[in-house]
Image (tube, rainbow, N blue to C red):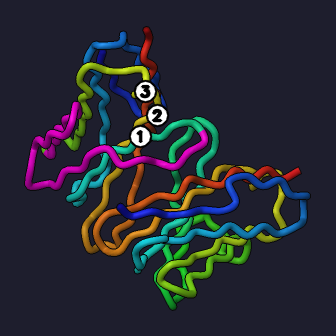
Amino acid sequence: GENVGLHLPTLSVQEGDNSIINCAYSNSASDYFIWYKQESGKGPQFIIDIRSNMDKRQGQRVTVLLNKTVKHLSLQIAATQPGDSAVYFCAETVTGGGNKLTFGTGTQLKVEL
Amino acid sequence: GAVVSQHPSRVICKSGTSVKIECRSLDFQATTMFWYRQFPKQSLMLMATSNEGSKATYEQGVEKDKFLINHASLTLSTLTVTSAHPEDSSFYICSASRGVGYTFGSGTRLTVV
């Protein structure tokens, strides 16, 4: 499943399928990007990060793609599991610019059995 | 790994009273701490950035006299919501950084009645 948008959309996928969550960031000067997972009533949990000198980075079951030309990030989750159900946020920052993180609007991922 | 402890996790207070939220980095020294507010089904909005031993820098639109931030040591920052009103009810989250990376607390659900 794939979803694009800036207004907390919901992405529903079947267990075992791959998920693609998209994010459009705003600041062309941002050079460090992070994906977070947030479960209900909890703080954000780090998933994976990428610097602007890369366009792809892989972790365990997750891949982040960065397209600086169009200011776009995506998070790919392979073999989505029920435990992946959460809200996912991208965040951007300019290194050395106070290191403030700016969060995207988020995507609710629902994994259906 | 880096751990940030945030307390309390939930608090209910009467309108007009003040509430203090604590954020502690347990196993590292946090040179910078960030405070966020999150309304239901919305993203994290940065309220302020604090560096140890100096005054906090507040984001535009955040009342510094209402949201008092103290960062007296490298392991503790506090956010005090003064004269709380129902519209201050929200999920407050802290984040600590030692220059590289960010570790988030588990959040505080504030309900003002």
Residue B65 located left or right of residue A51: right
1 vs 3, front mark: 3
Amino acid type of the residue tagged 3 in the rendering: Gly
Residue A78 or B45: which is nearer the viewer?
A: A78
* Residue corresponding to mark 1: A37
**Pointer 3 residue:** A83
Q: Give SS at disc 3.
A: helix
A21 on left or right of A64: right
Tell whether label 1 touches label 2 (CB within 8 Å). yes
Q: Is residue A33 above or below residue A55?
A: below
Q: Give the answer, above or below, for where B94 lies relative to A45.
A: below
Residue highlighted by disc 2: A87
Task: Say which mark, if any, is on residue B93.
Answer: none
Q: Which residue is at the front of the view, B24 or A90? A: B24
Is there CB contact under 8 Å for labels 3 and 2? Answer: no
Which residue is drawn at the image coordinates 26% and 74% (left, top)? A96
- Identify the magenta region: A41-68
Could you tell me residue B90's position as x and y percent? 69, 50
Secondary structure of the residue carrying numbered label 2: strand
Queried whether the magenta region covers residue A48, the answer comes back as: yes
Q: Examine the image and state in which quarter residue A31 appears.
A: bottom left
| Amino acid type, label 2 | Val
Using the image, determine if residue A25 lies above or below residue A5. below
